[in-house]
């Protein structure tokens, strides 16, 4: 589904992502971990059109080169993301927030009625149906993260990129989130690429884990393989491994 080859992103003399190559297939949940400053969010930004990678970088989605596409064009093809810092419209209701994903997040043109049906379906899936008419500004952070996930779901993604969506959540909320991520794959056939610092969360749900360190891909494998990789333990997991 997603094929990234020799992706490189520089900021002046700083190489933030250094020739990273990997693939994500249909129905996979893939974790992305690494120390602060490893280049994880820069990698996401370079895949989704927020940043333009250097010449020679390859990003293909469903066999189409998307490096030169605008962010909204990439999203409408089915490659959708959330952000580390929640970006919702506080002055709108919960339902109106999710409507933006349904109305503007797909290539197809749909009616307001169909968009609202999709939005309410997404809210029901995430567990926010009872909050539909509330002002978004009054939601706690955990529910704002759920809302951003519902808005992404309403755009009918095929691959969903999650950037530290578990940060700031309680253990119980994290358990609910990991269950939701599994259901996205199992019930909606959505692949997931997930940046996360909370190791127990990502290791419990991912099929594979990719490790970045100083912009380079340090390792890739199953959660068990990553936990037992000495180079990963030294660079990142430390005693928690």
Image: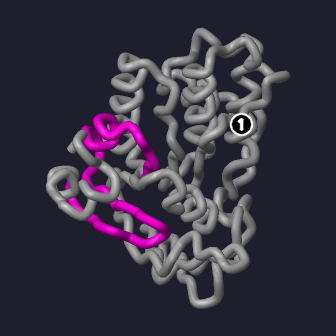
68 in relation to 129, above or below? below
Q: Which residue is drawn at 56% across and 58% down?
A: 79
Of 32 and 80, nearer the camera is 32
**Is residue 147 among the parts visible in the rendering?**
yes
Of 138 and 226, nearer the camera is 226
* Place of residue 84 in the rendered image (x, y in percent of width and height, measured from the top left): 60, 42
Of 217 and 102, nearer the camera is 217
Q: Find disc 1 in the rendering and name its residue.
A: 87
Q: In the displayed orientation, state which residue is furthest to the bottom.
A: 56
- The reply to whether the magenta stretch includes residue 206 is yes
- Label 1: how many Cα within 10 Å (few below 14, some 14–19, many 20+): few
Q: Give the range drawn in magenta.
A: 193-222
Q: In this view, does 29 lie to the left or right of 105?
A: left
189 in relation to 113, above or below? below
* Place of residue 198 in the rendered image (x, y in percent of width and height, measured from the top left): 38, 37
Of 116 and 27, nearer the camera is 27
- The reply to whether the magenta stretch includes residue 211 is yes
194 in relation to 204, above or below? below
Q: In this view, does 237 lie to the left or right of 194?
A: left
């Amino acid at each position: 589904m997603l094929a990234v080859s020799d992706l490189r992103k520089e900021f002046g003399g700083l190489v933030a992502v250094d020739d990273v190559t990997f693939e994500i297939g249909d129905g996979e949940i893939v974790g992305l971990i690494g120390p602060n400053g490893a280049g994880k969010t820069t990698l996401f930004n370079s895949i989704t059109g927020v940043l333009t990678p250097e010449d020679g970088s390859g990003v293909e989605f469903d066999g189409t080169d998307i490096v030169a596409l605008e962010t909204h064009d990439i999203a409408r093809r089915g490659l959708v993301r959330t952000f580390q810092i929640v970006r919702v419209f506080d002055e709108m209701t919960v339902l109106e927030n999710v409507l933006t994903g349904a109305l503007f997040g797909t290539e197809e043109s749909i009616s307001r009625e169909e968009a609202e049906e999709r939005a309410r379906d997404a809210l029901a899936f995430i567990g926010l149906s009872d909050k539909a008419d509330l002002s978004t500004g009054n939601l706690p952070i955990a529910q704002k993260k759920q809302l951003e996930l519902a808005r992404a779901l309403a755009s009918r993604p095929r691959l969903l990129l999650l950037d530290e969506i578990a940060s700031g959540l309680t253990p119980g909320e994290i358990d609910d989130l990991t269950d939701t991520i599994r259901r996205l794959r199992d019930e909606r056939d959505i692949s997931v690429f997930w940046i996360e610092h909370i190791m127990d969360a990502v290791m419990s749900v991912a099929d594979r884990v990719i490790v970045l360190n100083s912009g380079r891909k340090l390792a890739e494998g199953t959660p068990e393989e990553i936990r037992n990789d000495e180079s990963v333990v030294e660079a990142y997991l430390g005693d928690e491994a």
